[in-house]
Image (tube, rainbow, N blue to C red):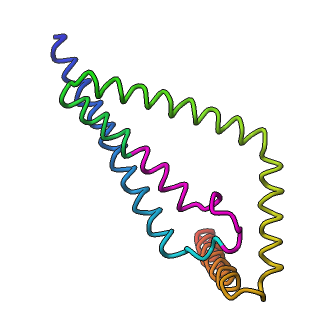
């Protein structure tokens, strides 16, 4: 009876980590596509750290690594991989908690910083062809998104 329960837990852990691994790969793919397609949007903000594709690539890489360690550790019942998975998961949860606390504490200054960056980008609209193109693409995307929400509201 106990042996069957351990086997079920082993395969459930494998399945959960497989989903995490596939999700991480999909985030890497989405981040790469966004980075290639909208690379000039960085001209608007002027700060590469605020770029969504970069954030997606980092989070996707972490999820892929974590899912791989969890899958291999669960299916092979390898103690070292399972402990590595647990330590990385604990570090990731600690970092997420810290990020939420920092984000809550600094949300006003973050909003003000982005507002200043956007206003600076608008001032440079006619000075640089890259900034002008980035603002135009951003406006086109926002119109498409707005159109999707308007179509969804009509029933």
Image coords of residue 23 (percent x, y):
38, 50
The residue positioned farthest toward the top in the image shown: 2
- What span is colored magenta in the figure? 43-63
Return the x and y of residue 88 as percentages of the image width and height: 43, 31
Q: Is residue 109 above or below residue 133?
A: above
Which residue shows up at 50% across the image and 30% down it? 91
Reply yes or no: does residue 53 show up in magenta: yes
Which quadrant would the N terminus be assigned to in this image?
top left
Residue 74 image point, x, y percent: 25, 29
Asked if residue 24 lies left or right of residue 132, the reply is: left
Among the 4 quarters of the image, the one containing residue 153: bottom right
Would residue 122 be found to the left or right of residue 33 on screen?
Answer: right
Examine the residues drawn in magenta and state their main secondary structure.
Answer: helix
Quadrant housing the C terminus: bottom right
Residue 116 among those drawn in magenta: no
The residue at the point 49 percent across, 51 percent down is 58
Q: Is residue 63 left or right of residue 68?
A: right
Q: In the displayed structure, would residue 79 be above or below residue 11?
A: above
Residue at x-position 82% and y-position 50%: 109
> How many numbered circles are shown?
0
Q: Which quadrant of the figure has residue 79?
A: top left
């Amino acid at each position: 009876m106990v042996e069957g329960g351990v086997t079920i837990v082993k395969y459930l852990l494998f399945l959960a980590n497989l989903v995490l691994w596939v999700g991480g790969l999909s985030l890497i793919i989405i981040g790469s596509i966004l980075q290639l397609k909208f690379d000039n949007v960085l001209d608007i903000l002027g700060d590469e750290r605020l770029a969504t594709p970069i954030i997606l690539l980092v989070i996707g890489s972490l999820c892929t690594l974590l899912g791989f360690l969890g899958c291999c550790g669960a299916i092979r019942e390898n103690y070292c991989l399972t402990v590595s998975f647990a330590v990385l998961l604990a570090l990731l949860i600690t970092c997420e908690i810290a990020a939420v606390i920092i984000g809550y504490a600094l949300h006003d200054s973050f909003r003000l910083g982005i507002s200043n960056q956007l206003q600076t980008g608008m001032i440079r609209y006619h000075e640089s062809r890259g900034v002008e193109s980035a603002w135009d693409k951003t406006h086109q995307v926002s119109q498409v998104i707005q159109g999707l929400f308007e179509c969804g509201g009509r029933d």
